Image (cartoon, helix red, strand yellow):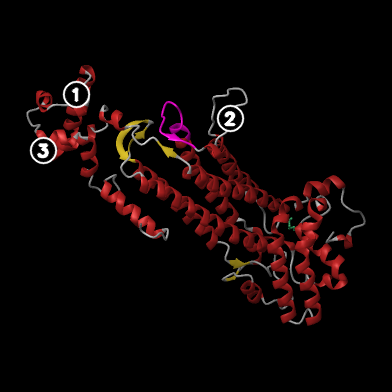
Amino acid sequence: MLWGGRFQQGPDAMALRFSSSFHFDFRLLKYELKVNTAHVEMLNEIGIIEGKELVEITDGLNSIEDEFVKLGKSVEGEYEDIHSFIEKTLFDKIGSVALKIHSGRSRNDLVVTSVMMWMRENVNTLIKEIKFLQLIILRKAEAHQQVLIPSYTHLQRAQPVSLAFHMLSHIYKLERDIERLGFVLSQIDKCPLGSGAIAGSTLPLDRGSVGKKLGFSSVSENATDSTNQRDYILDMLHASSVGMIHLSSLAEEIILWSTKEWDFVKISEEFTTGSSLMPQKRNPDIAELIRGKTGRASGNYLSLSTTLKAMPFGYNRDLQEDKEALFDSFDTFYMSVKLMAGIINGLSFNEDRFVEELNNDFTLSTDLADWLVMKNIPFRKAHDLVGRIVLDCEEKKVSFSKMTLEHLKIFDQIFDASALEAISLRGAFERKKTTGSTNPEFVREEIEKWKRKLNLESA
Ligand code: ARG
């Protein structure tokens, strides 16, 4: 216990179990040891710890990680938190000189510093994994520029697009996820250590020196805010929640595409499971779980934002609730990103699946209306005219691909041979001209752009 002096009784066993954070904050060990080392080095620089003591303490700190691995799970329940574990273990190893390490600091500034360091490393790892997922999607896009699929609005067939174009849309979502994580990194770049419990310290601490040793760009400005605010964790929970929402809708598409009804993709066996009852089944469980765990990520944001609401003044123990949400959202997002890369890498596409159906469909109706607009027909009139043509075709069971000029002329004499081209499947792609459209030339340029951005050799 770090605070026994003014107490005559130890804590109630259940109260200790209820309040202990050690079973999750042990994940901060590596960072907490770095923070401790930087702090004692600084205490030595300002003359509070002697050189000999510094060596003893840092040697002791260096052995704690191994000690923890040795003790493993058996230490759970014994300690209030990771901070108590380190101080007690250090004391057991090097004796009373260990009692000096907490000079000029509090667990309130210590915990936020360690969490920020944990976040810096792990958010950077997460960004790398999202980039890798972008790369996997890009490879699939590049290999499927000629594959045509229907796009959907309202889950009804809308307009034909290339599979490459569709895949690129997911790369953009992931890019914004990376930008959100970049913002999170920008919010954890001021070292809070030295804020003390709430008001700073009477000791002549060199906060700049500690911050620099720990890789922060500067030090935080207000000790009350530094120990009380958890905005950066909320930002991370938000970034994870939006990221999971993106992965969830990607998972949903893959699940739909893999059904007999869609019959567009096969998910590789490694990412599917069987049914305990129906021998024929192969279920997309991993994609389903990515979709399902999105609720957990959104819940973590709600959970911490509710905890933080009406948080008075400085540190309150409620703030300990930040870490389980943080670790859980990170683990969920990180694993989902990695698994999604595996799923997409292993997808095989039924490339010809839609060609016939798109030819026999009316997904190029807008293209025909656009053709009329270019002949100076107001769009509303063009829309109505094409609607009547589609109705007639449906009644006569004629698709656009079988349409003749004579048939079109029944509706309006304005039609000529170029109108038939407007409703030919391949031609429709080339004629899309706007930036951001499914035009194959734009899609090719987009792929090259993303290759450069993701640092790939073009080949
Ligand atoms: N386990 C605590 C947390 O995560 C550490 C800080 C405790 N501070 C305190 N004054 N009791 O927030």
Q: Main secondary structure of the magenta part?
A: loop
Query: What are the residue bounds of the magenta stretch?
Result: 255-267
The numbered mark, 1 or 3, whose residue comes first in the sequence reads 3
Residue at the image point whose x is 38% and y is 55% from the top: 450
Q: Which residue lies under the disc numbered 3?
A: 375
Q: Amino acid at mark 1?
A: Arg
Q: Nearer the viewer, residue 229 or 33?
A: 33
Please identify the quadrant where the C terminus is shown: bottom left
Which mark is nearer the camera, 2 or 3? Answer: 2
Q: Mark 2 and mark 3: span between their CA atoms?
A: 57 Å
Q: Mark 2 and mark 1: span between their CA atoms?
A: 48 Å
Q: Tell whether circle 2 marks a residue whose Cβ is less than 8 angstroms from ligand 1.
A: no
Q: Which residue lies under the disc numbered 2?
A: 274
The numbered mark, 2 or 3, whose residue comes first in the sequence reads 2
> Which quadrant holds residue 88?
bottom right
Q: Nearer the viewer, residue 406 or 327?
A: 406
> Which quadrant holds residue 229?
bottom right
Q: Which residue lies under the disc numbered 1?
A: 388
Could you tell me which secondary element the residue under label 3 belongs to?
loop
Q: Amino acid at mark 2?
A: Gly
Residue at the image point whose x is 20% and y is 35% from the top: 424
Which image quarter has ligand 1? bottom right
Location of residue 132 in the rendering, given as x and y in whole percent from the top left corner = 48, 53
Location of residue 146 in the rendering, given as x and y in whole percent from the top left corner = 30, 42
Q: Is residue 259 magenta?
A: yes
